[in-house]
Amino acid sequence: MTLLPLPVGASHARETFAVMKPFAGMARSYIGLVTLSLLLGGCAIGPDYQRPQLQTPAQFKQIEGWTQAKPGDVLARGSWWQVYEDAELNALVERLNLSNQNLAASEAQYRQARALVRGARAAFYPSVSSSAGGSRGGQGAGSQSASSAASSNSSGVSSSYDLSLNAAWELDVWGKLRRSLESSRAGYAASAADLAALTLSLQAELVQTYLQLRVLDDQQRLLDATVAAYARSLTLTQNQYNAGIVPRSDVSQALTQLRSTQAQAIDLNWQRAQLEHAIAVLIGVPPSELNIAAREQLPVLPEIPVALPSQLLERRPDVAAAERRVIAANAEIGVAEAAWYPDLTLSATGGYRGSSFTDWVSLPNRFWSLGPQLALSLFDGGARRAELARSEAAYDQTVAQYRQAVLDSFREVEDYLVQLRVLEQEAVFQAQALDAARESLRLIENQYRAGAVDFNSVVNVQATALSNERSNLTLLGSRLTASVQLIAALGGGWRQ
């Protein structure tokens, strides 16, 4: 680093008027220099941000009513989980918003980004510091100069006291500080979007887990009712065997069916426990402190509107975060380009320096210094060129990541729209199959009681009916989960 100073500093011990006169003249010169610097700094070095070009569809293939969206993640999302009309779910999500530790960590990172913005903004202002100190030193009497000997004692020991006030101000002639502030602001906005994206993701995870737990509760009730029905069937078969109506094999089949179903019912316990533990961690409490009681009522499956406004996709915070990182990377190119230009700094120092503590702060011991300084790196072995190339490559990387985030957002919405549409169509046929299975079970049981069919026929129909019952609940769970995923893909619901 080669420094190119302008020699205007001085130290004086004269009368106030004699000191202030040259100071005032130089001050006028520096004011003119500052004005010229501000005029030169009207335009910052480096490219101004332009949103990357994207090839996006005019509307979604899976549903009508969509048009191309523009980023607008500041739009309100609201309490989207309330569409499931479950008060306990609402309370759990509110606890997650307050107590989740991943959210706490992300919020701390967001505050770090905000502090970086304040730090970048502070670079626009002068820095002022002060210092005070004293020292004693000595050397051989023969090597002392005449001036120092006058202020030294016989042993060659001298004292020095210094009190100073220092000020420095780097003028942003080329816009380096402005580009740095622009980058910090974009990083701060990206951190805010990251926090919103994580919040939405954790909320969606909690809602999906809770809905799965409630579907398991319904499956548990189904299996418990089925176990009770199979127990009655075993009793009936045992009585018929005792009366010599049916063979011993019918009793064995009834017992096998009962025990198998009991095992399936027990297997649901650990699955439900794991879901409950996951919810506990999401709301920030140990698993042992959360107990979600089983209940009969399932959450409401929300109805998806036929047409959705295009503004909904604009609320996706992950897409907004990706674009803001493009803005930050673009500003960093300007910072790297500004390194090729000299830095201009104004500095001023004033204070008192003396060899005696008693008259240390006095007019004869006063000194001052004022002057600008230009600093330019003349040779760095290609470091600046390498940093500029790195900044440009980082910008290209963030542009590609932003475009990929947009493409992924369109894909996710398309996926969940078609999934919900297909599951809805599947549910119609599954409901018909379930009605048929229930009717077939009713008829076969009546025929068995009348002795028209063997028990093996009853077992087959019972197994088919139970399979359809469980398939119906599994399908409902898939539809609930897909609805949550669509809401998250839309950035937080379809309500404006």
Image (cartoon, grey):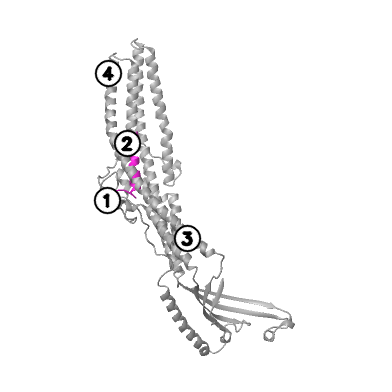
Q: Main secondary structure of the magenta part?
A: helix
Q: Which residue is mark 4?
A: 446
> Which callout, 1 or 4, points at the residue further toward the start of the chain?
1
In the rendered structure, which segment of residues is drawn in magenta? 474-496
For disc 3, the neighbor class at 10 Å (few under 14, some 14 to 19, many from 20) is many
What residue appears at the point 39 percent right and 62 percent down from the top-left corner? 49
Amino acid at pointer 1: Pro
Label located before the other in sequence (3 or 1): 1
Locate residue 473: give its quadrant: top left
Label 4 or label 2, whichever comes before in sequence order = 4
Q: Secondary structure at mark 3?
A: helix
Residue under pointer 3: 391
User: Is any part of residue 120 visible from this angle?
Assistant: yes
Marks 3/1: CA–CA distance:
38 Å
Question: Of all residues shown, which one is farthest toward the top?
Answer: 244
Secondary element at tag 4? helix
Point out the tag, 3 or 4, that comes first from the N-terminus: 3
Q: Amino acid at mark 3?
A: Ser
The Cα–Cα distance between marks 2 and 3, rounded to whole angstroms, is 50 Å
Q: Is residue 35 magenta?
A: no
Which sits in the foreground, 19 or 260?
Answer: 19
Q: Could you give the CA–CA distance between mark 4 and mark 2, rounded to whole angstroms?
A: 30 Å
Residue identified by numbered label 2: 476
Marks 1/2 in contact by CB < 8 Å: the verdict is no
